[in-house]
């Protein structure tokens, strides 16, 4: 499992989404033979469905069709956006990989209450330096606001524009997971005894955190408008750019980088409960970023559209500037084993990886990994006392590579 191909351990030959040529995804005959495809329903099984044309009008049929008018959904007619097939009929799949993401997501079950935070309470109050407390608090302040934004993006701006149910179903799970992540940060904040009002308000009063949030807010607000017509090429391009931002940068880079300061504390035996919570969250975010990148690529293919290189360059530059400003604030005073230079260097390296997955130009050619320990540290290991906390082996197991 890795960021580029997170379903690899479970893959049948039809389940290598990020590596499969895009043309295969559009080939309904190939998909019809996949292990997760179902045969087309008989007309008698589709009595409650509406015709494609009617389904496209926000689920408001113009008349009730007689059973004889109903045709089974042809998977070839499905599209990621602007589709006209019945959104209420799951199979036959056109995107069987989306269903596999959903099944895989359901293997990472936990709640923040499962993880013992007692040692973290002691560490925070008796072991962390003032500089380390500053890092810990601001990581939480940034992440908790970010996950609410991520939830609103998928649940309010993205899902409603999808016109294939297998895509919406994974995204519905993602909405839940983002809410679960917010609960997790809240549980950490509560367990440690931090001032909740102050922590939650921090993104509004600390400009270095606010910059990242504002960049995301602008992208989100631009695709939340009710009057968007994705048949308009300018609107479509803006939606594609927002999708690339949220999957490739916001989740693919900023979340990934967002956890690493806490993993550096964990390496030194500090705040291990919080780090374990973040390991679970990272499992979800690997899938979120990978799924989003795959959907963005499918939109590019189906709608015959490419992101404007100049717009992409500006987006990467703004994201890098925001991340750099954030790192300057977060690590204004050094802590042992982690630096702002390493933080921003890793951002550039990971950004290149996401760009390759998206099929676009690398924004920071030559960037090298600056946190070589991160992959191993982010993985879950059964090194703890079994009676102290539950075993956290991920069901799908396998060798994990996080970037
Ligand atoms: Fe999240
Ligand atoms: Fe996410």
Image: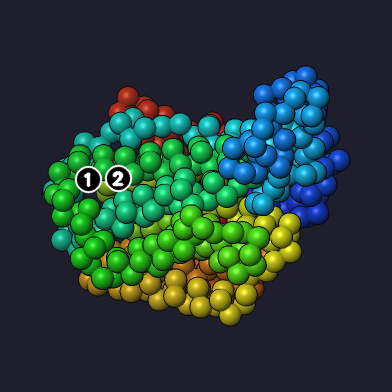
From the image, tell me which residue sits under label 2: 185
Q: Report the front residue among 25 and 72.
A: 72
Q: Report the front residue among 88 and 36.
A: 88
In the rendered image, residue 180, in percent from the top left (x then y), is placed at 38, 39
In the rendered image, residue 399, in percent from the top left (x then y), is placed at 58, 43
Image quarter for residue 240? bottom right
Distance Cα–Cα, label 2 vs label 1: 6 Å
In the rendered image, residue 222, in percent from the top left (x then y), is placed at 46, 63
Can residue 206 be seen in this snapshot?
A: yes
From the image, tell me which residue sits under label 1: 189
Tag 2 near tag 1, CB within 8 Å:
yes
Whether residue 56 is situated above or below residue 395 in the rendered picture: below
Quarter of the rendering occupied by the C terminus: bottom right
Q: Looking at this view, name the residue that lies furthest to the top.
A: 44
Q: Which residue is drawn at 20% across and 41% down?
A: 190
Q: Report the front residue among 216 and 112.
A: 216
Secondary structure under the numbered disc 2 in the rendered image: helix
Q: How many marks do you count on the picture?
A: 2
Can residue 9 be seen in this snapshot?
A: no
């Amino acid at each position: 499992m890795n960021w580029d191909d997170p379903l690899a351990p479970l893959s049948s030959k039809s389940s290598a989404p990020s590596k499969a040529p895009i043309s295969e995804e559009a080939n309904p005959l190939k998909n019809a033979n996949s292990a997760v495809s179902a045969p087309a329903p008989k007309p008698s099984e589709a009595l409650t469905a509406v015709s494609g044309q009617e389904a496209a009008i926000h689920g408001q049929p113009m008349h009730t069709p007689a059973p004889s008018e109903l045709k089974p959904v042809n998977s070839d007619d499905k599209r990621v956006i602007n589709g006209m097939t019945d959104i209420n009929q799951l199979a036959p799949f056109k995107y069987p990989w989306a269903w596999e993401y959903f099944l895989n997501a359901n293997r990472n079950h936990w709640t923040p209450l499962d993880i013992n935070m007692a040692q973290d309470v002691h560490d925070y109050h008796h072991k962390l330096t003032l500089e380390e407390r500053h890092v810990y608090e601001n990581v939480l302040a940034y992440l908790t606001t970010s996950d609410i934004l991520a939830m609103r993006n998928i649940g309010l701006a993205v899902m409603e524009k999808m016109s294939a149910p297998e895509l919406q179903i994974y995204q519905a799970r993602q909405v839940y997971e983002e809410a679960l992540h917010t609960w997790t940060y809240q549980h950490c904040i509560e367990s440690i005894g931090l001032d909740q009002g102050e922590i939650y308000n921090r993104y509004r009063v600390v400009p270095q955190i606010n910059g990242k949030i504002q960049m995301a807010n602008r992208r989100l607000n631009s695709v939340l408008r009710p009057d968007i017509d994705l048949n308009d090429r300018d609107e479509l391009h803006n939606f594609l750019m927002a999708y690339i931002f949220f999957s490739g940068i916001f989740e693919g880079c900023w979340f990934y980088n967002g956890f690493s300061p806490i993993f550096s504390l964990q390496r030194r035996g500090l705040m291990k409960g919080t780090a374990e919570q973040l390991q679970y969250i990272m499992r979800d975010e690997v899938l979120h970023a990978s799924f989003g990148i795959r959907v963005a690529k499918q939109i590019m293919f189906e709608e015959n559209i490419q992101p404007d290189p100049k717009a992409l360059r500006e987006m990467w530059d703004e994201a890098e500037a925001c991340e750099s400003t954030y790192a300057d604030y977060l690590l204004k005073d050094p802590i042992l084993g982690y630096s702002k230079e390493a933080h921003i260097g890793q951002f550039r390296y990971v950004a290149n990886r996401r760009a390759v997955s998206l099929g676009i130009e690398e924004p920071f050619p030559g960037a090298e990994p600056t946190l070589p320990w991160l992959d191993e540290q982010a993985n879950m290991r059964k090194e703890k006392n079994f009676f102290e906390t539950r075993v956290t082996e991920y069901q799908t197991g396998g060798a994990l590579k996080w970037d």
